[in-house]
């Protein structure tokens, strides 16, 4: 019982000490703000150095990731076809593909797949 309470206390105290040391050592100085600002030959920057992010590109990337993960979920379906009941396998596979096609239709209908207007 004593070793359990001792190990519990150590598991709480050691991370707290590490977090306190990390916060005290990572304090930002005034010089750090100057280092993180863009530098244009000694002059103040004329415009923002940050480029605006295209929301349309982000949506296409998210849609690609979603359908990429779905492909990774479809691949094992072919492998388990021989070991499962063919009726249940066909029903669940068609249901899964119909959900994917429904999502694709929704994205197409909302105009998220149109890259240029």
Image (cartoon, rainbow, N blue to C red):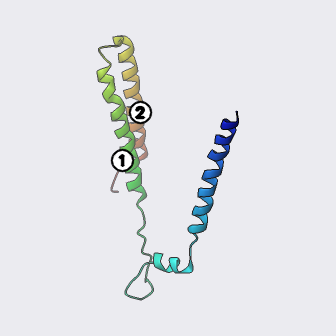
Q: Nearer the viewer, residue 14 or 38?
A: 14
Chain-order first, disc 1 or disc 2: 2
Seen at 42% across and 30% down, the residue is 99
15 horizontally vs 80: left or right: right
At x 61%, y 67%, the residue is: 24
Q: Splitting the image into 4 quarters, where does residue 97 fall?
A: top left
Query: Where does the C terminus fall, quadrant-wise?
Result: bottom left
Nearest the viewer among 91 and 117 is 91
Q: Tag 1's secondary structure?
A: loop
Task: Tell me where residue 45 appears, x and y as whole percent.
Answer: 43, 83
Q: Residue 34 location in percent, x, y? A: 49, 80
- Residue where numbered disc 2 is placed: 102
Per the model, the C-alpha gap separating discs 1 and 2 is 14 Å
Q: Which mark is residue 113?
A: 1
82 lies above or below 59: above
In this picture, residue 47 sits left or right of residue 29 = left
Q: Position of residue 83 (x, y in %)?
A: 32, 13
Q: Is residue 67 left or right of residue 21?
A: left
Q: Residues within 10 Å of mark 1 (few under 14, many from 20)?
A: some
Residue 72: image quadrant is top left
Q: Identify the element where label 2 is drawn.
A: helix
From the viewer's side, name the closer residue of 97 and 102. Answer: 97
């Amino acid at each position: 019982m004593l070793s359990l309470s001792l190990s519990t206390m150590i598991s709480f105290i050691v991370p707290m000490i590490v977090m306190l040391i990390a916060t005290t050592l990572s304090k930002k100085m005034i010089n750090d703000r100057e280092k993180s600002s863009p530098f244009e030959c000694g002059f103040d920057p004329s415009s923002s150095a940050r480029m605006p992010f295209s929301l349309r590109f982000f949506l296409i990337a998210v849609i690609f990731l979603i359908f990429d993960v779905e492909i990774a979920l479809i691949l094992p379906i072919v492998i388990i076809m021989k070991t499962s009941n063919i009726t249940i396998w066909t029903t669940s596979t068609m249901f899964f593909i119909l959900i994917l096609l429904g999502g694709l239709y929704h994205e197409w209908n909302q105009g998220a797949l149109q890259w240029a207007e």
